[in-house]
Image (cartoon, rainbow, N blue to C red):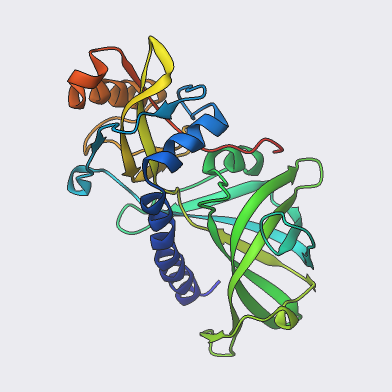
């Protein structure tokens, strides 16, 4: 694929990523704690039915101290379909992508240039597909032989069949582009009649981890959120999935991430935690993967 196309997709998803951040900011403490209460688990810690008090302390975020690398994830398939849905479930269409590689590729922005792959079933569990703050994705598809098209979605409710390497998503169409001969993309008005119900080879580009809340849970009372960071940038690691970023220079492992945030809870909110807090966050989840 032409490098200019990668850059166009990266810039587009970077712009869409801002709206994911706004979803967390607008939701505030109630949204963050509610997500944890609904999920009941985080990627590295558990928080059963935790809800915040009305006056729960909230820390601010100093992003200059954070070690964050932006990633883009790519899934490739031989063919696919896009079918309109009825009913009230999230997304207006069902996207089915068949005969994939079984792996999701990931690569980072410059200058790090981190490249790798992860089994798609495991990746879907890592990323998180919240109805309130879903991942953004760009689909580059072969509409007809020699004619490519480009559409942008929000992704919901992923399902993955390991035996057939088939991924299925509920999607909400955001914008559509038609690829021109010169490899540039021209924005078009999105209307249902422009969608391709069937297409050939396809590449799905998915943006990185969404921001999420880090909450400090009382060990002596797991139903209580003592304090929180309501909007915190999240990083990606192939072994850990999405997790709240650490300060620059900190080593990344399951134990170090959990210890880092638990210690920070008890340090930043010493009066509210009284040494009795552990850290939790919503993390990725995909019950049907």
Picture coordinates of residue 260, whole percent (x, y) = 28, 25
Picture coordinates of residue 77, whole percent (x, y) = 71, 59
| Residue 114 appears in the figure | yes
- Give the quarter of the image for residue 246: top left
20, 159: nearer the viewer = 20
Tell me if 19 is positioned left or right of 146 in this view: left
**Residue at the location (53% across, 87% down)?**
186
Q: Quadrant of the C terminus?
A: top right
Tell me if 4 is positioned left or right of 179 in this view: left
The residue furthest top is 220
- Give the quarter of the image for residue 18: bottom left
Task: Please determine whether, in this image, residue 231 is positioned above or below residue 182.
Answer: above
Q: Quadrant of the N terminus?
A: bottom right
| Residue 283 appears in the figure | no
196, 251: nearer the viewer = 196
**Residue at the location (61% across, 61% down)?**
204
Tell me if 88 is positioned left or right of 153 in this view: right
Picture coordinates of residue 245, whole percent (x, y) = 32, 39
Picture coordinates of residue 63, whole percent (x, y) = 22, 48
């Amino acid at each position: 694929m032409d490098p200019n196309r990668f850059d166009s997709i990266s810039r587009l998803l970077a712009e869409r990523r801002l709206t994911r951040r706004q979803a967390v900011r607008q939701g505030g403490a109630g949204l963050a704690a509610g997500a944890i209460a609904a999920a009941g688990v985080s990627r590295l810690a558990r928080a059963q039915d935790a809800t915040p008090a009305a006056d729960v302390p909230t820390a601010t975020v100093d992003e200059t101290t954070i070690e964050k690398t932006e990633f883009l994830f790519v899934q490739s398939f031989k063919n696919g379909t896009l079918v309109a849905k009825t009913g009230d479930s999230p997304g207006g269409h069902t996207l089915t992508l068949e005969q994939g590689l079984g792996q999701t590729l990931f690569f980072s922005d410059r200058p790090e240039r981190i490249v790798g792959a992860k089994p798609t079933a495991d990746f879907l569990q890592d990323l998180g597909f919240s109805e309130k703050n879903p991942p953004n994705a760009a689909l580059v598809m072969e509409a007809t032989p020699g004619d490519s098209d480009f559409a942008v979605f929000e992704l919901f409710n992923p399902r993955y069949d390991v035996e057939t390497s088939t991924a299925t998503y509920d999607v909400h169409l955001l914008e559509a582009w038609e690829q021109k001969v010169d490899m540039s993309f021209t924005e078009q008005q999105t209307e249902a009649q422009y969608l391709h119900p069937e297409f050939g080879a396809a590449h799905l580009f998915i943006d990185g981890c969404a921001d999420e809340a880090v909450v400090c849970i009382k060990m002596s009372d797991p139903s209580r959120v003592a304090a929180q960071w309501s909007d915190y940038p999240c990083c990606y690691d192939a072994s850990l999935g999405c997790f709240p970023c650490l300060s620059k220079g900190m080593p990344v492992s399951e134990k170090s991430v959990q210890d880092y945030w638990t210690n920070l809870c008890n340090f930043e909110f010493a009066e509210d935690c009284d040494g009795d807090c552990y850290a939790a966050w919503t993390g990725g989840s995909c019950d049907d993967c």
